[in-house]
Amino acid sequence: MIIATVEGWVEAPLARYVEEARARLALLLHPSGQVVAQAGFTRSTDVMTACALAAAVHATSKELGRQVDGSGFRVLHHGGTDKQLHLAAVDLGRVAYICLTVFDEESSLGLVRMYFGDLCRELAAAAPEQPAKGPSLGLDFERELNHNLSALFGRA
Amino acid sequence: MSLVNYSTREITCKIVYYGPGRSGKTTNLHYIYGQVPEDRKGKMVSLATQTDRTLFFDFLPLDLGSISGFTTKFQLYTVPGQIYYQTTRKLVLQGADGVVFVADSQSRQLAENVESFQDLHENLAEQGIDARTVPLVIQYNKQDLPSELILGKQDLSDALNFRGVPEFSADALHGPGVFETLRSISELVLKRLSSGAGK
């Protein structure tokens, strides 16, 4: 199983969730569309793109829910031919995330929903009180940035 | 909100290209996509209408390589410029680390530019963000058009750039100004992140 996280405290609960819910993949993302953590098999999935699209779908559902129902929809389920998606909000107080779960015939919506509840509780218990401090970039970062951007555009 | 992964020493930042409809936001991303080597870019995703107007957003992930020991990745988004996509613009703007405002240099588009610029500030304010603190760069696109059709950089600057942010003339279709704009916003975003204000 592939595990990658930006926030270390997310790793164990997410890995456990994927295993217990028998999901193929779970992506935890920030509402801006940035990947926070991934667990499961991602060979055929472009993780960054999947997160950008998942954030868009979630934001749209939330806003649509707010407009037609007065409160935002928090959970969305899509049933495909082989795979299904479960997209839901994870509210941890200080920070809110979105979890995209991909599962197939090895699991079921009921199983995913049950263990998703456990995931939310475990993440809430593990979340740190304070956010981590930002990185300190070296004095020469502007030179490195210019060099890298020039290289990116074939001008180096 | 920039994401920093200390275990893999990786930084990911979100940059949104904002501006009125048909000002050239998607064209900027297309030019960047066309210039960047395959191994330094992800798929470009465009959620567009049948007439190729942006419906939700365009998305282009870029790998800038190592900066100060951090693998630095930028995610470029555009918003739909048409007035009736107001709600969508707000959603795409969520969590932006920096904004490129792409203005249309055509004289007849001046009012649309001003309206869109005000719309940007209102949408930031609605999200509780002080617009003066967000890294912002203004690009005056379509400067390649005949001079009788467009306003010069100084006229556009007088109308839009009251904050005195970095500004660039551009011809996004052919490239001039695209690279300079991206370099400038990248620098502002990383400086802000380094100062601790961007996380």
Image (spheres, coloured by chain):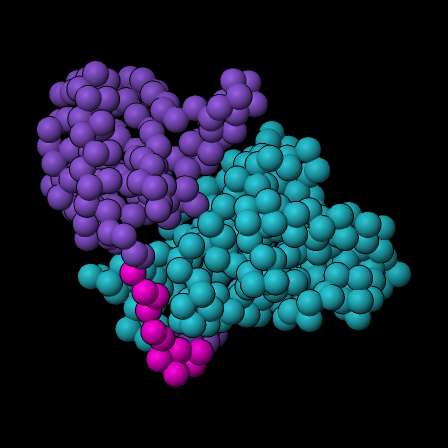
Chain colours: A purple, B cyan
Question: Image point 18% across, 26% down: which residue?
Answer: A115
A49 or A31, nearer to the observer: A31
Q: Is residue B113 something one can see in this rendering?
A: yes
Horizontal and vertical percent position of residue A41? 18, 38
Magenta stretch in the rendered image: A132-144
**Residue at x 59% of width, y 50% of height:** B124
Q: Nearer the viewer, residue B124 or A141?
A: B124
Chief SS of the magenta region: loop
How many numbered circles does the render carry?
0
Is residue B167 within the magenta segment?
no
Question: x, y (%) of residue B71?
Answer: 31, 65
Residue in the picture at 24% in, 63% down: B6
The N terminus of chain A - image quarter: top left
Can residue B24 be seen from the camera position used here? no
Side of A19 where A57 appears, left or right? right
User: Residue B65 placed where, x, y %?
Assistant: 34, 67
